[in-house]
Amino acid sequence: MEEKAIIVIQDLLKRYKNTAKNALDSLNLKVKQGDIYGLLGPNGAGKTSTISMLCGLLPPDSGEIIINGTNLRSKPDKVKAMIGVVPQEIALFEDLTAKENLMFFGRMHGLKKDEINRRGNDLLEKFSLTEKSNKRVKTFSGGMKRRLNLMVGIIHGPEILFLDEPSVGIDVQSKNVIIEYLKEINRSGTTIIYTSHLMEEAEKFCTEISIIDFGREITKGKPSELLENNKDCENLEDVFLKLTGRNVRE
Ligand SMILES: Nc1ncnc2c1ncn2[C@@H]1O[C@H](COP(=O)(O)OP(=O)(O)O)[C@@H](O)[C@H]1O
Ligand SMILES: [Mg+2]
């Protein structure tokens, strides 16, 4: 029996204004419930554009996105209630404290104050920010901001989580805490779609992978399948370089 696809992307096309080529050029993807799905590709491949469209922030020129059986175009609010997003750029209020940020984002997702406090305190503890919870974000280090950025994206316990390069520009410890936490919520049922250009991390972390370039799929499969299909490669990074080339990108 085929496992249930929780996300289906069909022929997604996007060209930004005043640009000469498609950022997404008929992209197709299927994510199964419970996957940790890695959307991998070099800079400029179209990862952020895909995530932005998946969470309804950017309208596609054409193509369809179906999440949990619901078309994003026709019922955006229904879809938005099921998802959480951790953007590539830190999106926090610098003049608010960690707790105030959690309260703001929790409220935005329709949670009650008590629930936000309870979940927020658990997350603060988990991500070692309890002592900093009443400090303003602008006093935080990069790693602390990354952790809080993740926390506000999952405060409502979404069943589908999108993360855009969550482990770029952070210390090894913060990265480890984030990855371990993501594995934990995946075990309890959260489907994760994550973008990265860090192949070593993706090889260990992802259950399924798509490598995309120039807005198109280059290959996909489980990490073990990609290695099996590219016997001349020692690891996923070799596969990536073989398929996307060695010239430097954006
Ligand atoms: N707002 C924008 N305006 C014009 N071009 C854009 C914009 N955002 C992204 N692009 C272009 O679209 C392509 C895909 O970008 P992006 O989705 O950010 O890739 P990635 O996240 O994989 O690095 C790139 O060629 C990029 O320059
Ligand atoms: Mg990006």
Image (cartoon, grey):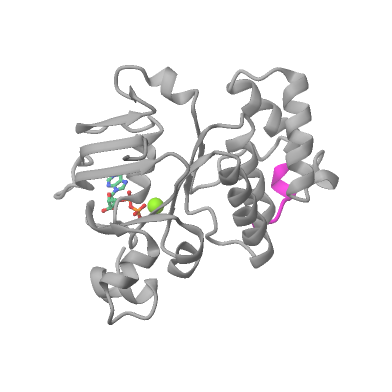
Nearest the eye: 35 or 139: 35
Position of residue 237 relative to residue 126, above or below, is below
Q: Residue furthest front?
A: 1
- Residue 224, position in %: x, y? 38, 67
Q: In this view, does 164 lie to the left or right of 18?
A: right
In the rendered image, residue 89, in percent from the top left (x then y), is placed at 50, 47
Between residues 242 and 233, which one lies in front from this camera angle?
Answer: 233
Instruction: Check the image and name the residue furthest to the right.
Output: 131
Q: Number of numbered discs present?
A: 0
Instruction: Look at 68% across and 33% down and name the residue there.
Output: 101
Q: Give the range drawn in magenta.
A: 136-142
Q: Is residue 246 magenta?
A: no
Task: Choose top left, top right, bottom left or bottom right for residue 244.
Answer: bottom left
Q: Is residue 138 magenta?
A: yes
Dividing the picture into quadrants, the one containing residue 68 is top left
Look at 61% across and 39% down and name the residue there. 92
Q: Quadrant of the N terminus?
A: top left
Seen in the image, is 95 located left or right of residue 214?
right
Q: Where is residue 38 in the image (x, y as percent from the top left)?
A: 41, 54
* Residue 48 versus residue 175 in the image, above or below: above
- Residue at image position (32%, 66%) is 226
Residue 170: % across, % down: 60, 61
* Quadrant, the C terminus: bottom left
At x 69%, y 52%, the residue is 144
In depth, the one of 39 and 50 nearer the eye is 39
